[in-house]
Image (tube, helix red, strand yellow):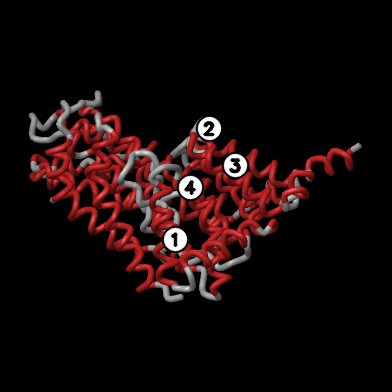
Amino acid sequence: MADIIINALKMPSELLGADIWCLILILITLVLFAADKWPMGFVAMVSSIVLALTGTMEVKQIYAGWSSNLVLMLIGMMIVGQAMFETGAVIMIGRPIMKAKWASNERSVMIALMLISGFLSAFLSNTAVVATFIPLIGAMVASSKGKLHQKYLMMPLGFAAAMGGTLTVIGSTSQPMVNTVLEGQGLELMGMFSILPVALPSFIFMIIYMSTVGYKGMKKHCDFEDVLIDTDASAMETFQPTWRTWVSIGVLVFCVIGFFLGLWTLAAIALIGAAVCIFTGCVSFKKAFNSVDWNTICVMAFAQGIAAAMNDSGAGAMIANWAVNVVGNNLVLQLAACIIVNTVLTNIMSNTATAAMMAPIYILIASQLGVSYMPFMIGIAVATNLTAATPIGGTAVTMTSQAGYRFKDFVKIGTPMNVVWAILTIVMTIICFPF
């Protein structure tokens, strides 16, 4: 009976061919990701199960991703990040902006917010950084006597957190996703700061653009009444750090140094940091694991199975052949196409899902062309964070919509920056990562 059921499940794959059947299922997965009707983690899990049961990959590949070094690292760093927020370390870092002499100058405040939130987002969850800075901005606006406006500060905050998350391999979820795909195929991973030379020029351009053209654009297009978020300004001003605040900061410093020096595996360093935070009471065990974005973790873990199915079934090779035939053997055009496609996709669907789908395809394209896969992986890792033209792809940007922004506001203000970001990414990837 078991053999009959197994053979019946494999019929679509046998009739259409494993590559065509796998491609159909992956296209359905992409549509479901974009539709956002069910959590992405659930969609990725079901997709991985169906791909395995219908014979496009081995059944053990369904759960293979849960032992991934990168998945465990991300869990650990999410807990460390929560400890930073629980102990008020982030408030302590951001509060000096409120008390600075130049805090009444809106552009100066904007630049400071972008720099600080961008730096924090390189090592912590960029969505958590935005969640922490939203009430901070509210407190500043409330106490500014009309000198500051929330609608001119929130959008730059979201862009900075999104772009800041691109400065390291752990800053956003799409970089670990690319590394997870590489790990699953036994390939060399991106280093902790290997993306920095490519992403930093775009981050610097963002600050210049938003403090000049972007600021004028917000003044022109954000013509709605400023929405004030209810916040307790006194709580921000009276916060006093405790020894646990300093412990959480120390743990983050330990993790960053450990990653840089390669003391142990990324997972081991992050989990040690998480354990110290829980042991010292910086965050309770319950809150620590409640803070983990299990939806993102599920996407990362089960995406390894999807990548394995694309590789084992031949679907990835088929797409790679098609891409090579369409674009040709010109490596610059191939890389440009890769970055442009990923930039467009990440503005209409999740950046994590985009990275999960595109990374295995471009590994095969690089193999077809006989060149290094690393320029394509770096391009994907950066491009899947270039979400400014819409508030859809990146959660950090989406969260700022509560300031009253409309979809068209992001299109008008963010699109020019998004275009320059893509061009800079193409140029810097070519310069920094030869084929």
Q: In the displayed structure, would residue 105 be above or below residue 208?
A: above
Local crowd at mark 4 within 10 Å, few (<14), some, or many (≥20)?
Answer: many
Amino acid of disc 3: Ala
Looking at this view, is 368 or 308 the one in front? Answer: 368
The image shows residue 411 at horizontal and vertical percentages of: 27, 42
**Marks 1/4: CA distance?**
16 Å
Residue 44's label in the rendered image is 3
The image shows residue 276 at horizontal and vertical percentages of: 50, 47
* Residue appearing at x 24%, y 26% in the figure: 229
Residue 286's label in the rendered image is 2
Q: How many marks?
A: 4
Tell me which label, 1 or 2, sits earlier in the chain: 2
Looking at this view, is 373 or 241 the one in front? Answer: 373
The image shows residue 124 at horizontal and vertical percentages of: 39, 48
For disc 4, the marked residue is: 352
Label 3 sits on a secondary structure element that is helix
Tell me which label, 2 or 4, sits earlier in the chain: 2
Local crowd at mark 2 within 10 Å, few (<14), some, or many (≥20)?
Answer: few
Residue 338's label in the rendered image is 1
Label 4 sits on a secondary structure element that is helix
Residues under numbered marks 4 and 3 in contact, where contact means CB atoms less than 8 Å apart: no
Local crowd at mark 3 within 10 Å, few (<14), some, or many (≥20)?
Answer: many
Side (left or right) of 87 relative to 271: left
Residue 240's label in the rendered image is none
Q: Quadrant of residue 158?
A: top left
Tell me which label, 1 or 4, sits earlier in the chain: 1
Side (left or right) of 177 relative to 166: right
